[in-house]
């Protein structure tokens, strides 16, 4: 199985660098709707030129529309998608289910790839992407060799894997660190990279515990191919063209020659960019301190980058193999044709050859002249020449015919496919609820549940699957009060963890639980299989009305909207299913595969401190992972008038570090029966703009 090499292109020059250095495909952003909005990106003219340039040379182009978009932004994104479809883009990457729904309307024939921002990390997630009509999905970067192999064995669509470049500390699509702290959302393409800053575990921010080295799978290319991975992705749309050229050349040559990069080539990768070397820790399933590193200023590798510039800036690398055909017969015009690998044929006819008076034309001469494709994107693979003996023809005629057919082939290769393009129609609008929202409660630990909290009768109570399995008696206590009990599924669970999760779901059903809170696509299949009523959690990224419609189509009865939205944006959503908003709790900032629990202090309290002295609780998550929470709790009890006018079904109180007494007091406060107020709190992002 061939392994496609996909290179980043943050600028028109980077497109040239990637293509001339051996990329099979490039991915790029056009407009303001992609996960690297700080990259130069492309104007309409530059985008059209890039697609034509790549297609002429047999390279595919994937457009990134992989951010969460508001209702106001979707029409603009639809115009971008329609234009991309007309130009002939080969696929569009998405994160937002609303964007996916829009694409089905606007450009139904363009393949859709699921971005790593979808947080797909198990087979169920891949199957759900296939169900949604995607043809490829980019797996989470945290997966090991074994996990990837298991997915590839049974995946009905193509699998793409990150092979080189920057690693986020958090699972992509689940990071809110940049938005909550700085108002710049990674889910909106403007991550401020807070994980590269200094933090500490005591009183001082004196280390870099969230800064991972760049990944490199140099040394594992043949394994990737054997596993059945379709595409190897190189990261770096924010990097300069010379960087793109260096990494593309090295991986391309190794793949083409069926080998791994040499030590010298790995050294060149390091010179181009690294953070104290590279890591393959996730691939090997070996997390820990050796995966971490920071960028050290070493200066630009001038000689290496000069060589890279020379490679891609000085003329064409002949990339497209073609076959020439010629027929030279007495009394007939000369015939020349050229065929490309996809079967396109360009033909031309020339003058009638004359009888040779001295030296007759030979097939060897014809082959020599037609093979001279220098300065073009084509390389001659074969020349089939039929030449009758005793004829004469100036080689200038052959040269002219060669140029003519290559020019025609060039034009044909750049013709975009004919595709169905339609207008975007948001569809019917749903009226907002007029009654104030009910209150739901999500607990992290069983010991947070008290009789006082149950007496306050939340509209729904959620407990993690593991906690309910460990304390099954709680189901009876909750359900006896006529309070719906929902099982909270872990946002991250690998296939190896599925048997244990299945046992927990079976137990929950036997205890009378009928509702499930689903945080990513990866749990949807299991929740459906066991017959739970589906409720969407914040990890699904509900940012627009089209996403709510898509979740309804998938069977969801309710969904939590993104807490990166402002109140007016939530109010204006067309709510076709019950919607919920987080109105209390420490907002989740990161969920990490690298466990941070080994940093626990003697008091048992694990808190990350930043340069301002803010302290962020770090809790253990499902599977030994870690979750970093905001230093302050979101508190809106005194703003109930504001969130009550948004048309919500529910406001959710999300309890994490609180004890049972505090949980009950906070619920009472939101019900107007207590005066509780935290010492420190935040209003979250509901009242301020998020870029």
Image (tube, grey):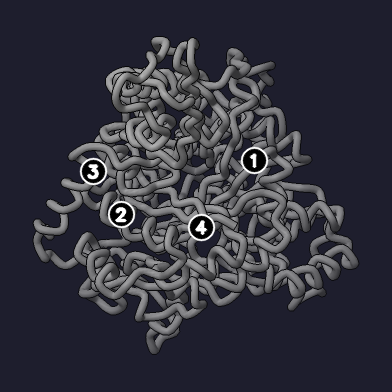
Q: Are marks 2 and 1 in contact (CB under 8 Å)?
A: no
Return the mark for residue 378: none
Q: Is residue 676 visible?
A: no
Of callouts 2 and 4, the N-terminal one: 4
Question: Considering only order in the chain, which callout, 2 or 3, is on the residue closer to the N terminus?
Answer: 2
- As drawn, is 192 to the left or to the right of 500? left
- Residue in the image at 53% along x and 70% along y: 223
The residue drawn where x is 71% and y is 48% is 128
Compare residues 605 and 55 and report the one nearer the observer.
55
Looking at the rendered structure, the secondary structure element under dot 1 is loop
The residue under label 3 is 312
Residue 613 falls in image quadrant: bottom left
Left or right: 247 with respect to 648? left
**Residue to which mark 4 is pinned:** 161
Residue indicated by mark 1: 134
- Residue 193: which numbered mark, if any? 2
Q: Secondary structure at mark 2?
A: loop
Query: CA–CA distance between discs 3 and 1?
Result: 33 Å
């Amino acid at each position: 199985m061939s392994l496609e090499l996909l290179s980043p292109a943050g600028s028109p020059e980077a497109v040239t660098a990637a293509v001339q250095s051996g990329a099979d495909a490039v991915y790029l952003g056009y407009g303001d709707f992609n996960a690297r909005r700080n990259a130069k990106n492309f104007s309409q003219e530059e985008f059209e030129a890039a697609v034509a340039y790549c297609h002429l040379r047999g390279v595919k182009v994937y457009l990134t529309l992989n951010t969460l978009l508001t209702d106001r932004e979707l029409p603009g994104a639809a115009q971008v998608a329609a234009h991309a479809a007309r130009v002939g883009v080969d696929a569009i990457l998405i994160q937002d289910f609303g964007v996916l729904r829009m694409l089905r309307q606007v450009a139904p024939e363009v393949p859709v790839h699921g971005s790593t921002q979808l947080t797909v990390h198990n087979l169920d997630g891949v199957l759900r992407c296939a169900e949604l009509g995607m043809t490829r999905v980019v797996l989470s970067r945290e997966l090991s060799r074994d996990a990837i192999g298991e997915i590839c064995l049974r995946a009905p669509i193509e699998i793409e894997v990150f092979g080189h470049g920057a690693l986020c500390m958090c699972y992509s699509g689940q990071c809110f660190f940049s938005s909550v702290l700085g108002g710049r959302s990674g889910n909106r393409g403007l991550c401020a990279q807070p994980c590269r800053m200094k933090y500490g575990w005591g009183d001082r921010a004196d280390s870099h515990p969230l800064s991972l080295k760049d990944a490199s799978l140099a040394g594992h290319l043949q394994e990737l191919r054997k596993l059945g991975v379709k595409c190897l992705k190189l990261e770096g749309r924010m990097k300069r063209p010379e960087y793109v050229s260096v990494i593309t050349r090295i991986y391309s040559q190794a793949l083409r020659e069926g080998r791994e990069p040499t030590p010298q080539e790995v050294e060149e990768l390091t010179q181009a960019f690294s953070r104290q070397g590279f890591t393959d820790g996730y691939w090997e399933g070996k997390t820990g301190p050796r995966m971490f590193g920071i960028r050290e200023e070493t200066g630009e590798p001038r000689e290496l980058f000069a060589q890279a510039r020379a490679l891609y800036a000085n003329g064409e690398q002949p990339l497209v193999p073609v076959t020439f055909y010629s027929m030279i017969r007495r009394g007939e015009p000369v015939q020349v044709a050229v065929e490309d690998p996809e079967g396109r044929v360009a033909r031309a006819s020339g003058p009638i050859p004359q009888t040779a008076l001295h030296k007759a034309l030979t097939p060897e001469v014809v082959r020599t002249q037609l093979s001279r494709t220098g300065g073009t994107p084509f390389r001659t693979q074969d020349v089939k020449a039929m030449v009758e003996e005793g004829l004469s023809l100036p080689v200038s005629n052959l040269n002219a015919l060669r140029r003519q057919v290559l020019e025609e082939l060039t034009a044909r290769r750049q013709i975009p496919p004919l595709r169905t393009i339609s207008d975007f129609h948001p569809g019917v609008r749903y009226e907002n609820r007029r009654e104030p929202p009910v209150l739901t409660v999500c607990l992290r630990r069983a010991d947070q549940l008290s009789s006082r909290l149950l007496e306050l009768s939340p509209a729904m109570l959620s407990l993690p699957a593991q906690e309910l399995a460990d304390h099954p008696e709680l189901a009876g206590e909750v359900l006896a009060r006529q309070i719906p009990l929902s099982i909270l599924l872990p946002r991250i669970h690998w296939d190896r963890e599925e048997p244990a999760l299945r046992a927990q779901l079976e137990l929950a059903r036997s205890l009378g639980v009928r509702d499930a809170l689903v945080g990513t696509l990866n749990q949807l299949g299991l929740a459906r299989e066991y017959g739970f009523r589906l409720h969407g959690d914040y990890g699904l990224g509900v940012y627009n009305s089209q996403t709510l419609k898509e979740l309804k189509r998938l069977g969801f009865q309710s969904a939590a909207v993104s807490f990166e939205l402002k109140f007016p944006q939530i109010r204006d959503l067309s709510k076709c299913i019950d919607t919920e908003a987080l109105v209390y709790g420490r907002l989740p900032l990161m969920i990490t595969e690298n466990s941070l629990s080994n940093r626990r202090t003697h008091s048992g309290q694990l808190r990350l401190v930043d340069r301002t002295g803010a302290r962020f609780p770090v809790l253990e998550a499902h599977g030994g992972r870690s979750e970093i929470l905001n230093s302050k709790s979101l508190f809106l009890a005194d703003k109930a008038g504001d969130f009550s006018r948004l048309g919500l079904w529910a406001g959710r109180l999300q309890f994490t570090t609180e004890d049972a007494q505090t949980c009950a007091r906070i619920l009472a406060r939101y019900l107007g029966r207590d005066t509780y107020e935290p010492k420190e709190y935040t209003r979250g992002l509901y009242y301020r703009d998020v870029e």
